[in-house]
Amino acid sequence: MIRWRRGEVRELLPSWPGVSVCLVTVTEGDGRGRSCRALAYTDLVGEPRPGDAVLLNTGALDLGLGTGGYALVVALPDRLPADREGPGHLVKARYTPLQATVEGADEQDSPHHATLRDAGGVAGTPVVVADLHSALPAVLAGVLRDRPGARVVNVMTDGGALPAAFSRTLGVLREEGLLAGCVTTGQAFGGDLEAVTVHSGLLAARHVLDADVVVVCQGPGNLGTGTPWGFSGVSCGEAVNAAAVLDGRPVASLRLSEADPRPRHLGVSHHSLTAYGRVALARADVVVPLLPGVFGERVRAQAAPLGARHTLVEVDVEGLEDALRALPMKPSTMGRGLEEDRASFLGGAAAGRHAASLL
């Protein structure tokens, strides 16, 4: 299940907060060496230096997974980091070799415990639900295009990457002051706040981080099997239910593509049709962007059956492409940028525009 390897750090590569990327020489079982990139979560394993011996997990790298193009540093066995003292009794990545103890916003010793214990809901806060992590900057662009002063908070589920630090998107959006914060929920960890469930994550976003709009999505690394139910985005339907139970305004962002080579994801992805059409039991505003031409007609036709369960809201996309281009990073999804797959990003931006209209 785990492909264990030993290696040595040769060079430190450009990195980002919470993550150190290294060039390492990996020793194979037959004694041969090869070079690859390795990723170290510095809060977990410490700061690698050239010459350090490293214990590696090369499973995702050897399988050629798109988001997993790194070996992962499991430990610096000859230079272990000092113990980190601090509050917190929540364990994330539970009962794995790298389980981490964090302070949950909702645990008894947290300064926010009383607030979250007494919070009954999120008081009509718009909650945008999206399948892919790449939708986050697009939704944010749509919100801020029409409501520049809005506080937008990301609630990150554990369907993709568990460490929030893996997302360079989160780091850039925070540094640029566009995102007010991130709450990591379930087994995910490393956000500005930690929460046990999506429900308590929504409450923390609203009552601790003062969110005007919440965006619920998984971290990078969507998991799918090409089957009707075997994909991590099923949780989008559950997030709609959570938002509704807490008296929020669920806004469903459709996963769209005009360039995906897989037919099941062309137009409206089967992920959205299943999550919103079968899993979501509460009513949501399903945002249908008014895209031009035959493709736009296809999207409207594919989304139409969702109107039996939800409210279909058609949203104009004028000005949203400019908002996407103004982001501090180039939008990217499945290796495709704005020029290759405009619909993917305009769908998220339209959902953000609709959320802004609810404020």
Image (tube, helix red, strand yellow):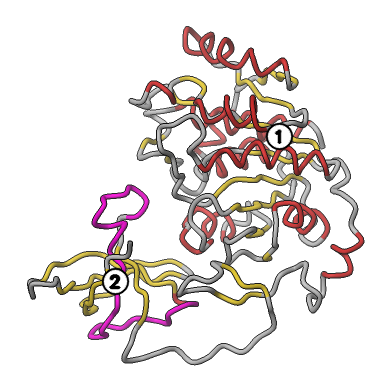
Which structural element holds mark 1? helix
Q: Specify few, some or many for label 2: CA neighbours under 10 Å numbering under 14, 14-19, or 20 or more.
A: many
- Name the residue that disc number 1 marks: 146
- Where residue 320 appears, as percent x and y from the top left, is 58, 29
Label placed on residue 22: 2
Viewer-closest of 60 and 129 = 60
User: Is there a contact, CB below 8 Å, between mark 1 and mark 2?
Assistant: no
**Relative to 46, is 66 on the left or the right?**
left
Label 1 vs label 2: CA separation?
41 Å
Classify residue 63 as left or right of residue 268.
left
How far across and how far down the image is residue 153, in percent?
A: 69, 52
Q: Is residue 106 above or below residue 254?
A: below
Left or right placement of residue 328 versus residue 254 in this view: left
Residue depicted at x 63% and y 12%:
304
Query: How many tags in the picture?
Result: 2
Residue 348 in which image quadrant: top right
| Nearer to the camera, 348 or 240 | 240
Q: Quadrant of residue 315?
A: top right
Labels 1, 2: front one: 2
The residue positioned 29% from the left and 60% from the top of the image is 59
Image location (x, y in percent) of residue 328: 50, 49
Secondary element under disc 2, as helix, strand or loop, is strand
Vertical side of 318 occupied by 22: above or below: below
Amino acid of disc 1:
Asp
Crowd tier of the residue under label 1, counting other residues whose Cα lies within 10 Å: few below 14, some 14–19, many 20 or above = some
Q: Quick check: is 46 in the magenta stretch?
A: yes
Q: Nearer the viewer, residue 173 or 32?
A: 32
Q: Is residue 232 magenta?
A: no
Q: Is residue 284 above or below residue 103?
A: above
| Residue stretch in magenta | 43-68
